[in-house]
Image (cartoon, rainbow, N blue to C red):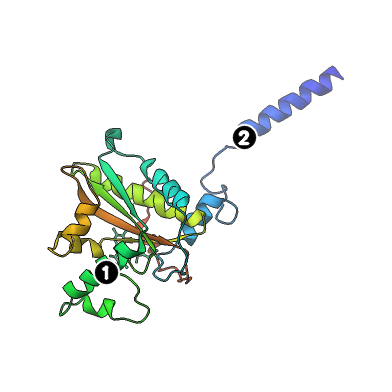
């Protein structure tokens, strides 16, 4: 019996030492079963939303996921402002529509289904940074966390830089000052958030850009 147990132990040891735990070829991908990967792969930019407000606790949670992103030297040179006030959004949009008359953006604001300047989102999260070596990357990672957190909670999002130019125009100044950003901070990115009313197909990605270096 003793000999049999020893033989079994030797067999088990040999088996584990011969099968590498990570193999380049045999490890399976988990797109179907891993919820994080599923969220990443199915997220799309949303530009049509249901007429349904997003609860503040959810917006807060998304923002907190944002500020948990990795950031250079943990300097956290960023600020977040959340606007879910329909009047604020409507009023900014009204001024924006006036300001883009006669410019290429006029087409976007007069298109079918246009509700507001934030690609129709009922809530917008503004990300500002104090410009520094890492801050644009930091804020991009923050936005990445936000869009994925939102997606996992059943919400749609769209990252937007387009509308931000408005906030440095004379018409946009009052809206910018209502954000009360700290001295030295500038708007970098906005993220529209709401309950999606469309399911756009994924835009093709070029996998050729990914290469292993041997
Ligand atoms: C930094 C950044 C700025 C963007 N600005 C805008 C924008 O101003 N308006 C817009 O409709 N989409 C904007 N987008 C969304 C992109 O168009 C979108 O992510 C891209 O087409 C890929 O589509 P997907 O997000 O559905 O995968 C922006 C995205 C990023 C990351």
The residue wearing badge 1 is 93
Q: Is residue 29 visible?
A: no
Q: Residue at x 41, y 43 (%)?
A: 64
Examine the image and state in which quarter residue 172 appears.
Answer: bottom left
The residue wearing badge 2 is 18
Q: Is residue 134 visible?
A: yes
Residue 83 x, y percent position in the rendering: 34, 56
As drawn, the residue found furthest toward the top would be 2
Callout 2 crowding tier (Cα within 10 Å): few <14, some 14–19, many ≥20: few
The vertical placement of 121 against 69, above or below, is below
Quarter that holds the C terminus: top left
Quarter that holds the N terminus: top right
Which one is in front, 34 or 77? Answer: 77
Kindly state the secondary structure of the residue where label 2 is placed: helix
Q: Earlier in the sequence, mark 2 or mark 1?
A: 2
Which one is in front, 161 or 51? Answer: 51
Residue 71 x, y percent position in the rendering: 31, 39
Residue 144 x, y percent position in the rendering: 38, 51
Callout 1 crowding tier (Cα within 10 Å): few <14, some 14–19, many ≥20: many
Examine the image and state in which quarter residue 203 appears.
Answer: bottom left
Whole-number angstrom distance, CA of label 2 to CA of label 1 = 65 Å
Q: Residue at x 35, y 51 (%)?
A: 143
The vertical placement of 189 against 86, above or below, is above
* The image quadrant in which ligand 1 is located: bottom left
Kindly state the secondary structure of the residue where label 1 is placed: helix
Which one is in front, 21 or 14? Answer: 21
Q: Nearer the viewer, mark 2 or mark 1?
A: 1
């Amino acid at each position: 019996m003793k000999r049999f147990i020893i033989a079994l132990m030797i067999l088990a040891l040999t088996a584990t030492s011969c099968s590498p735990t990570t193999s380049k070829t045999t490890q399976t991908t988990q797109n179907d079963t891993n919820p994080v990967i599923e969220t990443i792969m199915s997220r799309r930019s949303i530009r049509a939303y249901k007429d349904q407000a997003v609860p503040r606790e959810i917006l807060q949670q998304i923002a907190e996921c944002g500020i948990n992103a990795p950031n250079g030297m943990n300097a956290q040179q960023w600020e977040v402002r959340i606007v879910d006030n329909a009047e604020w959004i409507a009023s900014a949009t009204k001024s924006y529509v006036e300001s883009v008359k006669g410019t290429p953006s006029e087409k976007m604001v007069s298109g079918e289904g246009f509700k507001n300047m934030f690609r129709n989102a009922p809530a917008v999260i503004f990300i500002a940074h104090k410009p520094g070596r890492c801050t644009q990357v930091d804020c991009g990672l923050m936005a990445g966390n936000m869009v994925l957190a939102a997606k996992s909670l059943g919400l749609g999002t769209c990252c937007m830089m387009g509308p931000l130019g408005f906030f440095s125009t004379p018409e946009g100044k009052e809206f910018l000052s209502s954000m009360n950003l700290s001295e030295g901070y500038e708007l970098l990115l906005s993220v529209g958030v709401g309950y999606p009313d469309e399911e756009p197909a994924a835009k093709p990605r070029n996998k050729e850009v990914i290469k292993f270096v041997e």
